Amino acid sequence: MKSFIAAIQFLTILPLGTKGTYAPRSMIPWFPIVGLLVGGLLALFDMVISRLWAPPAAAVLDVIVLMGVTGALHLDGLGDTADGLYGQRPAARSLEIMKDSRIGAMALVTVAACLALKWGGLAVLESRRVLLLALIPAYARSAMLFGIRALPYGRNREGTGYDLFESPLGWRDFIGVLVVGVFSLLLGWPAIFLNLAFILLVWMILIYYRRKIGCITGDMLGAMAEVTESTLFFLMAMEI
């Protein structure tokens, strides 16, 4: 339970457990389950507000709730990553830019585009809406496990993400991802599309990171979560 509480405190602002609980390595396997918790809260919230507002307005509130529950942690990482990886720079310079707390033009554009993509998907998502609202945040946080497993940490014993790379992840650390995949079967045949889209999206992001700077940071993990979440919401809203 300590590891689960630590994961909740790390990824959200939910006031659960003793303040300051932190177990970096052991909390990683719980990221997908925390995603299910976040998604479940989002689905409950959406069920209430959808009775009061039309879908486009409800989608705005859903996006705000997702930002609020996470404390905009992943959005901050997305912005820093966009600033750092934009253009043709050496890896060292990209990592230096990502450490800068100032927000650049690429950060603003990328964050705005990501939020617009998420809102667009949520505004028209109808079929299996409740289940997808619960599942997609879990897939987004599952993506971070693959980032931790696939790429080396890019900073020398510093940064928020350093402790997450203390030791390599084994297959048992991905049991939470498997749990999310099992729950996705409740969708029926769209589960195939969801899981294939997730695999392809994560693979493309990791390939991009590897070719760009050959490593990953805490900011880049947050960017993975945001891009995965926004894109999956948008893709699952397609009329197929």
Image (spheres, rainbow, N blue to C red):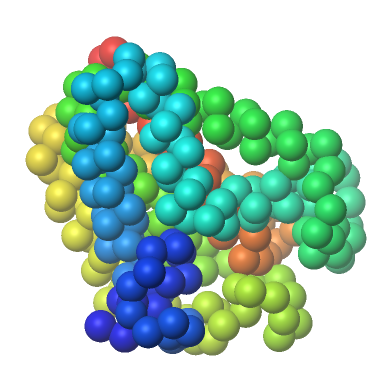
Give the image location of residue 180, x and y in percent: 23, 54
Query: Residue at point 27% right, 39% down?
Result: 45
Residue nearest the viewer, comparing 49 with 95? 49
Q: Is residue 178 left or right of residue 152?
A: left
Q: Quadrant of residue 143?
A: bottom left
Q: Is residue 68 above or below residue 150?
A: above
Q: Residue furthest front?
A: 52
Query: Residue at point 28% right, 29% down?
Result: 49
Give the image location of residue 122, x and y in percent: 38, 26
Q: Is residue 165 left or right of residue 110?
A: left
Q: Is residue 27 above or below residue 37?
A: below
Give the image location of residue 204, x and y in percent: 54, 43
Quadrant assignment for the C terminus: top left
Q: Is residue 149 visible?
A: no
Quadrant assignment for the N terminus: bottom left
Q: Is residue 118 left or right of residue 184?
A: right
Q: Quadrant of residue 115?
A: top right
Q: Is residue 121 left or right of residue 103?
A: left
Q: Quadrant of residue 233?
A: top left
Residue nearest the viewer, comparing 20 with 75? 20
**Number of numbered markers:** 0
Query: Residue at point 60% right, 73% down?
Result: 161
Q: Is residue 168 above or below residue 178?
A: below
Query: Residue at point 39% right, 35% down?
Result: 62
Give the image location of residue 219, x and y in percent: 65, 60
Q: Is residue 61 visible?
A: yes
